[in-house]
Structures are given as structure tokens and as C-alpha cells.
Image: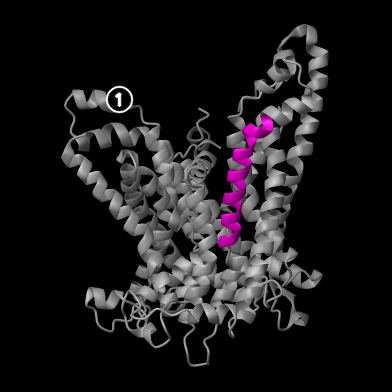
Amino acid sequence: MTRKEKVLWYVGALVIVLYAVVPVAYIISMSFKSEAALSDKQFFPSQWTWANYDGIFRGNGSDLFLPALRNSIITCLVATLIAVVLSMFAAYAIARLNFPGKRVVLTSALAVAVFPVITMVTPLFNLWRQIGLYDTIPGLIIPYLALTLPISIWTMSAFFRGIPWDMEQAAQVDGATSWQAFRKVIVPLAAPGVFTTAIIAFFIAWNDFVFGISLTSTSAAQPVPAALSSFTGSSYFVQPTGAISAAAVIVTIPVVVLALVFQRRIVAGLTNGAVKG
Amino acid sequence: METRSAGDVSVSRPAAKRRGTDKARAEARLGWYLAGPAFVILVAVTGYPILQALYESLFSYRLTAPADREFIGLKNYGVILSDSLWWGALGNTALITVVTVAVELVIGFALAMVMHKVLGWLRPIVRTAILIPYAIITVVSAYAWQYAFGLTTGFMNSLLGLGDFDWFANKWSALFVICLSEIWKTTPFISLLLLAGLAQVPADMTEAAKVDGATAWERLWKVTLPNMKASIMVALLFRALDAFRIFDNVYIMTNGAADTQTVSSLAYNQTISRLEIGLGSAVSVLLFVCVLLICFIAIKVFKVDLARARGEG
């Protein structure tokens, strides 16, 4: 590579970083602006204030935000756990066993992944009201499985297919019991794939908005994205911009930290699942 | 799809044939025990709603007056298909899909090229940065862009010297911001897919073209892109289907005001806001049909071969 080319790619890298960071920086900046400064049309706040964060954690926004945060964490963790366990079994079967209908499982996962989510909302809204699942956490976990299972099955079966399963038998030949062989050889090889899948599934559940606003109505089950859209200001005439920004920053922190810490694995998982399946 | 289990070997040996079939049968049973639960849930959580939506769409059914529920056949579809609201929403959705996917493909490819070429300490930084838009929830990104362009909150107007231009009062400028936020949020996904595709382009082929005197531009069009065709097609199909379902950004930014309704937001408004279950179901079914149509066109016309793209061919 010539020196000129090198500089060009480095400038490109800088542009990417800016591209990714600017909108996030703006929402962080808004979250530190005082109510009066919100309309100053400046990128950075002239005076930094914690008032917006205080408002959503202790002030009048906390009745809406704190339960929503709890709901989001519980719903997404449980949905992720169920999806990962079920798709682990499925992916093991797909990678390791020969059974008729393997293709059917993978194809239906693909079909569900492209299914328009809003099409599920009308019937579920109606049914959930009849059987009492409307505005409950289980009533949100079940549709979340439709979001998390397909990608979990694809990602994990891509990972599992790359595991050298013969090593398990080799270990047994060397005198290990089948349980020992499984635990000492297969589990450590499979663990990264399972973990990556869990993170991706969690991201997808955490991102949901359609089910959140359609299938819940109160702080009993409403997740954060839905709660964000129903914020109100400190009075009827005040726009809740500051509170929304602060809440947005809080829900963004955990996923961005996860993305940064496990970036290598997430990239591998996303591309494996989509390209190799 | 290959498996590396010992069962395959014994099936091919005649002496072990009987034991092999028994084994195959046991393996098939175990396979379904393991994959069954996930499969059943997948089918139930989507199969039931689509059948129910099909059924409900044949009724005049409003949740505020459940007693008046009445079978009306395909009348709901007639009402929707003769309404300009539906065609407007479909037009907006198609426009958003075409624009965002086209722009994302170009930007995504540029980003993938940079990630592919940048080496050393900068590489992990770029790869990490690009995951930020992917990780951020769509609602938050929608708020960030809305505030940036907002009349009272935004810095964009002063940056661009536009004074008091209200981006969300006008259909085209509102759709522009909606597209921008969608592009920002989902380009990373497309560029990661394209990066994986770039890695599959044989390096010696590009080198050979270089030795033969091909310019960088010729190498891109004659060597790199044709070798990436499979991953480009898959990225296109997935993003198009995803963009066609667009909802979150529209709901946050305009909630369908200024003629920015999309098919998904139309279905949502009919069902959840207006409690018109019959009409809402019919819109949902039509959306489903559109998605099927896109899949059909992609597979038949553009010959997107998912199996090959998955590296199995």
C-alpha cells in the first residue's frame, strides 16, 4: 500500500468513527442540558446538569422509568434464556444428528425471521385480552421468542457446525467417559457460540418496540422503549426532551458496553448466522 | 448439510445395515426431541397469528362494539384497497425501502472496504465503533435524529443555515429524516455482511488482475463485486424485508403525520389506536402478502440463493 492510500484509509476510518458516534453524542449532550438550554440549538450544553437523570431516577419520571427498566431487564433476560436453551438443543440436533426435517426447521426459522411483526400484533392483542396475558410480562416474553428464536437457531447452528465433534470420540478412546468427553471437550468449544448467541438475542429483545407499545399499557409490564414514548414533561406544557434523553442514555449504556466488550464475537456471530447459517 | 457422526458411516456398510436403520431411526427421534420444542414455538407464535388475522379480516369487527361483529367476506380488503390512505402508506413504505437499501448498500460497501483495508491498532477501533449504531435501540436513534432536526431542540438547522425550517411538517423532509435514521442504524449490519463477503474474495485473483494492469475501478467491478454476489444478494434481501416493516422511527418522529404513514404504522393505528380489529387484520394480512411477494421476487427474479450464500454450495 502506498503512503497516499494508507492516509486515505485512515481518513475513512475516522469518518466511520464519527458516523457512529455523533448521534449518540447528541443524545448524551441533550441529557445534560437544563430545561432552559434544551432549545439553544447548540450541540454541547453550555452548562452541564444532572437534573434530567435525577428526574427519571428520583423525580416524577421515576414512577414510569424505574418499573419500565425492571420490566425490560426481566423480560429480555428470560426471553433470551429460553431462546438460547431451546435453540441450543435445536442447533445440536442440526449440526450433529441426521434427521428428516432438518431443513424444515432451518427454513421455518428463516421464514419467522422475515415475518412482519405487526401482523402478529392484531391477533395477539385480541387473544391476550381474552386470556389475561395483556399487559403482563409473560405476555411479552412469548412474542419475544418469535424475535429471538430464529436468529438464535441460525447463529448457533453455524457455530455448532464448526465444532470438530470427532474430538469427543477421540477423548473417549483415550479413556474418558462420555460425560467427561462431553463436558471437557464439547462444552468449552460450544460455550463461545452459546454466549455470542445470547448477546445477540438479548440485543434483539431489548430493541423491541412494536410488542412493547401494543401488548402492554401500564408499568406492570411496559418495557423501556415503550415507556420512552409515553413520557410527559414536568408540566403539561413542557416537552419531556431532557427526561427522554436521560432515559435513552441509561438504556443505551448496557448494550453499548456489551457491544464494545464482545465486539469480536458479535461480529463473528452476526456474519456466521447470516452468511453461513 | 453434512454431519460428521459415526451413524453415517455405518449406514453405508451393508453388514451393519440393520443396526444402521435402527440407529438412523433413533437418531431421527432424538433429533426431533431436541429441535422439536423450538420448532413448535416458532410455528405457534407466528402460525396462529397469521391464521387468526386471516379469519378476523373477514369480519366487520370493532372492539368498542364487539356485539356488532359480522361476517362480511372480503369487504375489508375492498375498503382498504380503494382507500388512498393504503396506497399512500404503501408508496411511502416502498420509497423508504428502495432509498434506504440502495444508500445502505453503497455506504455499507464503503465502510466494509475501509474495515477490510485498515490495519493495526485502528482496526479494532473501527470495528467497535460500527457496532454502536447496531447496538442502540431504534427508538433511541429515532429520538436522537428527531432532536437533531427538531425545530426547537435541533442543531441541524443552525448548522445548515436553514433558520426555522420544520423538517417534520413536510412529507418529503420528514421522510428524509426517517430514512436518515434508518440508514444510520442499519448500515452497520449490511457492512458487516459485506465485510464477510469481501473476505471470501480470493486475494490471488485481485493480485492477478493487478499484474495484468487492471485499474482499481476495473478490479472492483470485474473481480471483487462478482465474487461477492451471494453475500450482496443476501444482504439486499434481508435489509429490504426489514426496511419494509419499518415502524419504530415513523412512530417516534411523526406518528404518521404529514402523510408519512407506512404499512406497519397503518396496521398499528387501525388495531391499537382505533380498535378496528377487522380492518387492522386485513392491513396486516396485506403486509404479509407484500413480504411474501418480496421474497418471491428476490428468489425467482434475482435468483438469491440462500443455500449458496450460506457457504453450502
Furthest-top residue in view?
Answer: B15
Which one is nearer the viewer's eye here, A153 or B133? Answer: B133
Q: Is residue A71 visible?
A: yes
According to the picture, the residue beneath numbered tag 1 turns out to be B205
- Residue at screen point 73% across, 25% down: A181
| Quadrant of the drawing holding the N terminus of chain B | top right
Corner quadrant of residue B113: top left
Query: Residue A246: image x %, image y %?
Result: 49, 74
Corner quadrant of residue B62: bottom right
Query: Is residue A257 shown above or below A88?
Result: below
Query: Residue B201: image x %, image y %?
Result: 36, 31
- Residue at screen point 36% across, 81% down: A47
Query: Is residue B135 shown above or below B236?
Result: below
Question: Tag count in the figure?
Answer: 1
**Three-letter code, disc 1:** Met
Q: Is residue B174 left or right of residue B307?
A: left
Chain containing the residue with disc 1? B
- Residue at screen point 48% across, 47% down: A263
Q: Does the magenta segment cover residue B253?
A: no
- Judging from the image, what secondary structure is the residue with disc 1 in? helix
Query: Is residue B21 shown above or below B45?
Result: above
Q: Magenta stretch? A: A186-207
- Residue at screen point 51% across, 64% down: A252
Corner quadrant of residue B33: top right
Q: Is residue B75 visible?
A: no
